[in-house]
Image (cartoon, rainbow, N blue to C red):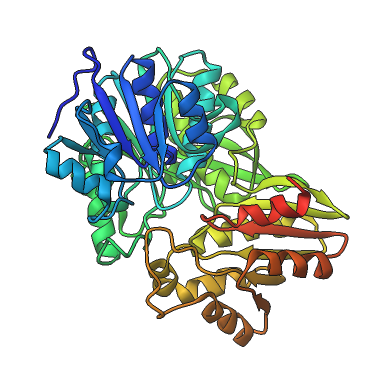
Amino acid sequence: MYIIDFNKPVHVHFMGIGGISMSGLAKLLLSRHFTVSGSDPNPSALTDELKSLGADVKIGQCAENITDTIDVVVYTNAISPDNPELLEVQRRNIPLLTRGELMGQVMKLFPHSIGIAGTHGKTTTTSLLSMFFLDAGTDPTISVGGVVPEIGGNFRVGHGEDFIVESCEYKNSFLSFFPTDEIILNIEADHLDFFKDLDDIRCSFRRFAKLVPEGGLVLVNSEIEDLSVLFKGIQGLKTYGVCKDGENADAFDYAAANVTYDDKGCGSFDYCENGKVIGRVSLGLVGSHNVSNAVPAIAMAMRYGIPFSTVQEAAKRFTGTKRRFEYKGTLGGIDIYDDYAHHPTEIKATLTAAKNTGHKRIITVFQPHTYSRTKALLDGFADALSLSDVVVLAKIYAAREKDTGEVSSEDIKNLLAKKGKEAYYFSGFDEIENFLLQFSTQGDMLITMGAGDVVNIGDMLLGH
């Protein structure tokens, strides 16, 4: 593997530079005076920002983008083997690094690197933990898989000793990382276009946990199935959880107890360590799932010596990242929200939170993400979406895949119909927008949901 000497800047080319993580790494290299170029299929706010910082960004990917001045090329999992740039890189024998390999090399620059992993909740937990460190004045470097208003984007270049990193399991990317401490939020079936099955995914998370060196903390959700078996022999292992009725806080190393919710659905709880109440925390985040996300973030912050009073203040102020139950605006008495949920567990968590807001009806516009995920989790999608009063389905967002004709959004609609739910399918966003304008009424909550471009529907309705 090509090893970058960060004290000797070279020319690095990013294939897929507009990606949320790739753009962050490009920013970091620019801050260290590297020459940065890159390409992406589509222009975006991220590519525009990189251009303003001095990167040479090409829209569209072709062999001509690869020049003799490039020392190393970084690529994403979305790059196909027949990509013209990749073929040219291979022809020229230019060294290649995956995004995960570069991230791992960056992590080794820091005395402390905290990896936050899990099937769901990574972005929110990473962002909340980052707020604790920022408010404490530790000046961390941050890499998060979403846009965080408080840092003005998805990546922050700090000058302190701490690097907080959202760590994705897809294609075992996080196994190239070098975390000194970890949070593992949950482990469920996902990315089945790469992993063979859930056991394969669990094996990957065990390997991730084994990366932490002696003296590090591996903080895991107590609800992970067969926890003691999966993580047997892992050093530094501790658990966290949310106390249910009759459950004592000393069942976990770190816990939320006596949980209540305000009229907006934001949770408050007693934060406990080893059964002892440290104090009361009130969140600016909605939903029970975010109570669970908050506990390990607080525990990790306390491990790093961040005052509990700082944690309390930041937890109440932080209302989330973009595309995580994000309020977009109101149109004719209809409140419009957007959420990134693209897995049944995430959908269930978001809709459960939405039902506590007191709206007359919940109308969910869902865009499935990838054919493989939709096919593998079809029944789960129908079960989760049935929590909504009305479901409007868009075409599957292909992302990195091709349509094989084996599954479509209409399959979800048909399953919902069998459950007696009101569900509709439209092939285009214009049709969905026109339907919603006629169908929605004052007092409704409209949620656009999915990891693709479904967010555009709410923006179009609001005239953004």
The x, y position of residue 292, in whole percent, is: 52, 46
Could you tell me if residue 217 is visible in this image? no
Q: Residue at x 57, y 27 (%)?
A: 152
Name the residue furthest front: 64
Q: Nearer the viewer, residue 331 or 214?
A: 331
Give the quadrant of the C terminus: top right
Q: Which residue is drawn at 22% across and 25% down?
A: 69
Q: Where is residue 202 in the image (x, y as percent from the top left)?
A: 27, 56
Work out whether residue 248 or residue 265 is closer to the camera in this orientation and state it: 265
Left or right: residue 293 versus residue 89 is: right
Q: Is residue 178 above or below residue 172?
A: above
Image height of 89 relative to 405, above or below = above
Residue 447 occupies quadrant: bottom right
Going by the picture, which residue comes out furthest to the bottom? 418
Quick check: can you spot residue 364? yes
Left or right relative to 454: residue 126: left
Give the tally of numbered discs: 0
Q: Quadrant for residue 357, please give it.
A: bottom right
Residue sitting at 50 percent across and 23 percent down?
A: 52
* Foreground of the two, 336 or 251: 336
| Left or right relative to 397: residue 404 | left
Compared to 123, does 421 lie above or below? below
Instruction: State which quarter of the image contains the N terminus.
Output: top left
Can you give x and y, in whole percent of width and height, for residue 297 in the image?
A: 47, 34
Locate residue 233: give its quadrant.
Answer: top left
Residue at point 83% right, 69% down? 438
Image location of residue 10, percent across then percent down: 23, 20
In screen coordinates, is 8 left or right of 459? left
